[in-house]
Amino acid sequence: QEKVQQSPESLIVPEGAMVSLNCSFSDSASQSIWWYQQHPGKGPKALISIFSNGNKKEGRLTVYLNRASLHVSLHIKDSQPSDSAVYLCAVVTEGADRLTFGKGTQLIIQP
Amino acid sequence: EAAVTQSPRNKVAVTGGKVTLSCNQTNNHNNMYWYRQDTGHGLRLIHYSYGAGSTEKGDIPDGYKASRPSQENFSLILELATPSQTSVYFCASRQGNTGQLYFGEGSKLTVL
């Protein structure tokens, strides 16, 4: 069964800083990796995904995938207080009928 | 924008009572899911469905039943609620095998 681990568990950074979140997974047959953002009292919302080795940039977000090391990272440039949320890493394994989620990273951006 | 609506949003139940959490989606998605979210455990899959009439067990199905009477509706049923089932429950829908789930706003259940 796929295992997904995220680090750090929590992170506090000043506004404007670069944020780096990490996620490691166990199954090299993973099809895609998704990052979800969850604000307090709300459901998770898909943020960005990556399918191929390498990186993908969308606005202030960049995600890096290294299949050889089974590692993916999410970087948030010029962080804003509105970025404060829990970030969940989710892995889709080929042939699987579900996503496997990590436990999340609590991010706090201090104004 | 894909929409998933859960009801009730908050529920207080007594131990041994029956609880039904309802979920409605207007996305016309085939797949629907019920998760619970607890501190230290993250999101854990309880039941899911491929379409009307279908229900499948997830990773933690004990103590829960599910019902999918139509494409739009998916319910989670706790026949005999216990305090350990106090949690926040999320419903989600998904089309095919894409990794993009659309979540509802959650249902907070407290079992006393």
Image (cartoon, coloured by chain):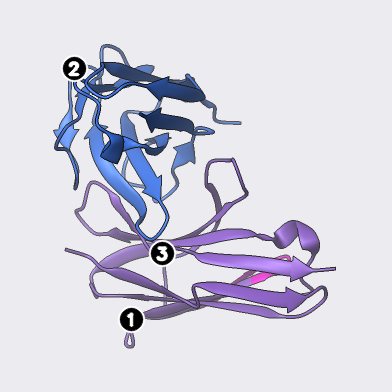
Chain colours: A purple, B blue
**The N terminus of chain B appears in which quarter of the rendering?**
top right
Q: Amino acid at mark 1?
A: Leu
Identify which amino acid the numbered label 2 is placed on: Gly
Q: Residue B66, located in which quarter of the rendered image?
A: top left
Residue B58 visible in the current orientation: yes
Horizontal placement of B63 versus B98: left or right? left
Look at mark 2 in the image and give the residue it sits on.
B53
Distance of label 2 from label 1 (alpha carbons): 37 Å
* Structural distance between the alpha carbons of marks 3 and 1: 11 Å
Label 2, label 3: how far apart the Cα atoms are: 30 Å
Tell me whether the residue at label 2 lies in contact with that at label 3, contact meaning CB atoms closer than 8 angstroms: no
Q: Which residues are magenta?
A: A55-61
Q: Residues within 10 Å of mark 3 (few under 14, many from 20)?
A: many
Q: Is residue A2 above or below residue A39?
A: below
Q: Amino acid at mark 3?
A: Ile
Residue A33 bears which disc, if any?
3
The residue indicated by pointer 1 is A70
Q: Residue at x 36, y 16 (%)?
A: B73
To which chain does the residue with label 2 belong? B
Q: Specify the subunit that label 3 lies on.
A: A
- Which residue is at a point 43% across and 23% down the rendered structure image? B12
